[in-house]
Image: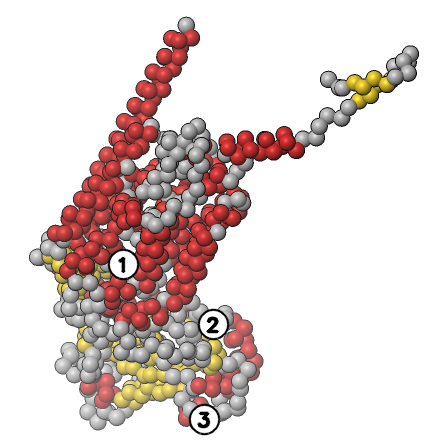
């Protein structure tokens, strides 16, 4: 009877293992099918079919990637351009307060070859102005180069290109202009399609709030605190030359014989936040009240004017934005809303002439305005040429705050010469990231060198390991974007075959430093150091599994014979990608999406749903089978395992009892890299050091447990003899306690 029960139990166990093996096989096939299906849903041309019309010769569209994000377009294996959404590159708040999202396509010369409005919430386009006018406006940018200086409604000045604004929607026009040109230039510069640099935002200057000198109008205009923009009617008429006339009798922009020198607008503007300007202009009490109402970092800009043209207009009444006046700084647009306006009544500045239009506009902190950097005030002059149609011309005045009024941040001049190689400039610009990465790698090196000391303190090792894995995910992965990939291996092999240049690989310092460290660790101890400590996606899986174990999620492990055969999948994937790379590295890169690294790490899951689903499935699987992807699918791990077969050392210690009879380490290994015979498979080991903790644990490792018990027995004190004395016997009798 007992024999029958035992046989039934063995049969049930075998059946369960077979079902588990089938389930794992089906799970692997599901992952591959999901991966293969992603090609049909990931490309930007599937989401926006019009992108195909921008590139008639394109054979495929890549996925949105890089910084800033853009999708490469291929003709065979050659990149012929990029497509991107402006909101992902340069979101600029528009009239509604929300950015306009525009699809933009550029070719390899930096020419804009396609634009389309994807999303907008402009109220001005919902109340009488057809939205088609915005579509037509953005279409005018096709054919322009990303480095062209395009001015909306401006005059045809040397070095600039004029594009007429949308009638009665000038703010929307200016925002669309900045959106398209800034986004296109950022993508073109990042892909080295054009030369130059983006205007970087340096630390802003701070106002010297305790610096004050008595001054009058003459002194403040003389030192540049107040700047002037003066236009005559003749200058405005010239700006509209060749444009339709309004036909209105009282149109100040129309030609008027004998009135060419009349004042059209005589405008003065100043940053009045510095006490020397603000206190002299407003008086002490009014200035104090104004400064109390401002938040730290706000700037107050005073504008006063005379003439027949109003800089305020009536646009702000309809939409809440002063559409005739704005500020530009470092290609950034600053608009004024009705809530930014403060009345300027009874100026106290001695010698200041009377002005019929005055006001103060507040630039609120957080918009990115730097009071110490040059900026430009732009005035839009409107000519109405029909009941619902207007044309515009832009006039500009520059401004630089006097040096005495601000404290400029210390600027450390770069020791890198202008003619230095590009990779040198990149390394200098990322010196902080390099320092943090270097510190992390040095700390990991200490753990490896002193591992015999560390593993004797399991609680310390566990805390250090979890902390380092978080560092790997957050800093190396999400912040530094230094997730290594099988593409790096394929690119390196291709470069060795077709012409190797160090400068190509030096352009990404974090990736280069990591690969250098990995190469050394491969030579010394094999693949485990990277896979167990430095891979961001692998670290995510370990952290998820540790959390799952704490939540008592059931852990699944395939039978040994299934487990060892599933190892082969990643090597097959590696061979497949390597074969493709011999034909085309770009094609191999396309299929290397079997790695979810770009989705989960580089793009922070901001990607097409197919890619996100694939990455999430793998992370969920890690909650049940620790590092499922790393064990069975990862081609990068396979490549490192092949490279690490020629390691010089085996620093993980074993005993003769390991495997026979002891199976503790083999059972507890997080990736099942220890065979039942006790040997560590360094091709699969992730160097977590758990087996070394057990190796030093005299309450867990059977040989050490046996030795500890012998020591405890040997140190136990001998029994103490007990003597009893009988009442009728004078001789003492010795008795031994039972």
Residues packed near mark 3 inside 10 Å, few (<14), some (14 to 19) or many (20 plus): few
Q: Are marks 3 and 2 in contact (CB under 8 Å)?
A: no
736 left or right of 468? right
- In depth, the one of 396 and 592 nearer the eye is 592
Secondary structure category for the residue under label 1: loop
- In depth, the one of 404 and 420 nearer the eye is 420
666 left or right of 210? left
Q: Look at the picture and state if 91 lies above or below 226.
A: above
Cα distance between the residues tagged 3 and 1 = 52 Å
Q: Residue furthest left?
A: 57
Cα distance between the residues tagged 3 and 2 = 26 Å
Report the residue marked by disc 3.
Answer: 219
Report the residue marked by disc 2.
Answer: 297
Dot 3 or dot 2, earlier in sequence: 3
Cα distance between the residues tagged 2 and 1 = 33 Å
Determine the residue positioned at 32% across, 26% down. Answer: 20
Q: Which colour assignment does the render follow?
A: secondary structure
Report the residue marked by disc 1.
Answer: 66
Can residue 305 be spotted in the picture? no
Determine the residue positioned at 31% across, 68% down. Answer: 426
Q: Look at the picture and state if 313 lies above or below 64.
A: below
């Amino acid at each position: 009877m007992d024999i029958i029960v035992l046989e039934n139990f063995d049969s049930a166990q075998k059946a369960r293992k077979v079902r588990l093996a089938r389930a794992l096989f089906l799970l692997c096939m599901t992952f591959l099918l999901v991966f293969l299906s992603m090609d049909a849903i990931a490309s930007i041309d599937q989401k926006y079919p019009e992108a195909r019309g921008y590139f008639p010769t394109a054979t495929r569209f890549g996925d949105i990637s890089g910084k800033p994000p853009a999708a490469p377009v291929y003709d065979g294996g050659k990149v012929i351009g990029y497509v991107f959404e402006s909101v992902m590159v340069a979101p600029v708040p528009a009239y509604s307060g929300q950015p306009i999202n525009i699809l933009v396509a550029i070719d390899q010369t930096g020419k804009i070859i396609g634009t389309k409005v994807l999303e907008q919430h402009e109220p001005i386009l919902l109340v009488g102005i057809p939205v088609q006018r915005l579509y037509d406006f953005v279409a005018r940018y096709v054919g322009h180069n990303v480095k062209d200086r395009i001015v909306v409604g401006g005059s045809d000045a040397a070095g600039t290109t004029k594009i007429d604004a949308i009638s009665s929607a000038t703010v929307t026009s200016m925002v669309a202009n900045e959106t398209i040109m800034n986004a296109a230039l950022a993508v073109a510069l990042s892909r080295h399609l054009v030369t130059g640099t983006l205007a970087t935002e340096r630390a802003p200057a701070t106002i010297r709030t305790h610096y004050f000198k008595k001054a009058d109008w003459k002194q403040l205009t003389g030192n540049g605190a107040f700047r002037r923009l003066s236009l005559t009617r003749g200058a405005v008429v010239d700006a509209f030359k060749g444009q339709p006339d309004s036909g209105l009798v009282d149109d100040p922009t129309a030609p008027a014989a004998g009135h060419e020198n009349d004042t059209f607008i005589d405008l003065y503007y100043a940053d009045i936040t510095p006490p020397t300007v603000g206190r002299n202009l407003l008086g002490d009490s009014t200035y104090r009240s104004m400064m109390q109402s401002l938040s730290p970092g706000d700037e107050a800009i005073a504008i006063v004017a005379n003439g027949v043209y109003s800089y305020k207009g009536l646009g702000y009444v309809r939409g809440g934005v002063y559409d005739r006046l704005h500020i530009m700084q470092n290609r950034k647009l600053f608009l004024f809303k009705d809530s930014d306006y403060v009345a300027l009544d009874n100026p106290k500045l001695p010698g200041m002439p009377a002005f019929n239009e005055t006001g103060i506009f507040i630039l609120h902190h957080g918009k990115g305005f730097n009071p110490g950097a040059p900026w430009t005030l732009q005035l839009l002059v409107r000519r109405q040429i029909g009941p619902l149609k207007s044309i515009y011309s832009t006039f500009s005045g520059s401004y630089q705050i006097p040096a005495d009024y601000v404290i400029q941040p210390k600027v450390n001049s770069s020791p890198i010469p202008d003619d230095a190689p590009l990779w040198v400039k990149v390394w200098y610009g990322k010196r902080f990231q390099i320092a943090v990465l270097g510190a992390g790698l040095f700390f990991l090196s200490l753990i490896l060198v002193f591992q015999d000391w560390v593993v004797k303190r399991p609680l310390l090792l566990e805390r250090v390991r979890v902390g380092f894995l978080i560092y790997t995910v957050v800093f190396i992965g999400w912040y530094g974007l230094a997730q290594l990939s099988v593409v790096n291996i394929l690119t390196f092999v291709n470069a060795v075959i077709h012409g190797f240049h160090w400068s190509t690989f030096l352009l990404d310092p974090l990736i280069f430093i990591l690969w250098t460290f990995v190469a050394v660790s491969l030579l010394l101890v094999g693949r485990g150091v990277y896979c167990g400590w430095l891979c961001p996606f692998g670290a995510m899986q370990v952290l998820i599994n540790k959390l799952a174990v704490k939540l008592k999620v059931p852990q699944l492990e395939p039978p040994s014979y299934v487990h060892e055969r599933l190892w082969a999948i990643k090597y097959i994937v590696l061979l497949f990608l390597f074969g493709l790379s011999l034909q085309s590295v770009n094609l191999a890169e396309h299929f290397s999406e079997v790695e979810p690294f770009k989705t989960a790490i580089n793009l922070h899951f901001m990607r097409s749903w197919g890619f996100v689903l694939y990455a999430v499935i793998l992370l969920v699987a890690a909650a049940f089978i620790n590092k499922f992807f790393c064990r069975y699918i990862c081609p990068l791990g396979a490549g490192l395992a092949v490279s690490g077969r020629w390691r010089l050392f085996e620093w993980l210690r074993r005993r003769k009892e390991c495997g026979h009879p002891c199976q503790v380490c083999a059972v507890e290994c997080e990736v099942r890299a220890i065979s039942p015979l006790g040997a560590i498979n360094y091709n699969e080991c992730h160097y977590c050091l758990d087996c070394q903790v057990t190796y030093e644990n005299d309450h867990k490792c059977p040989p050490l447990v046996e030795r500890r018990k012998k020591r405890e027995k040997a140190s136990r004190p001998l029994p103490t003899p007990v003597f009893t004395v009988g009442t009728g016997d004078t001789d003492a009798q010795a008795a031994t306690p039972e």
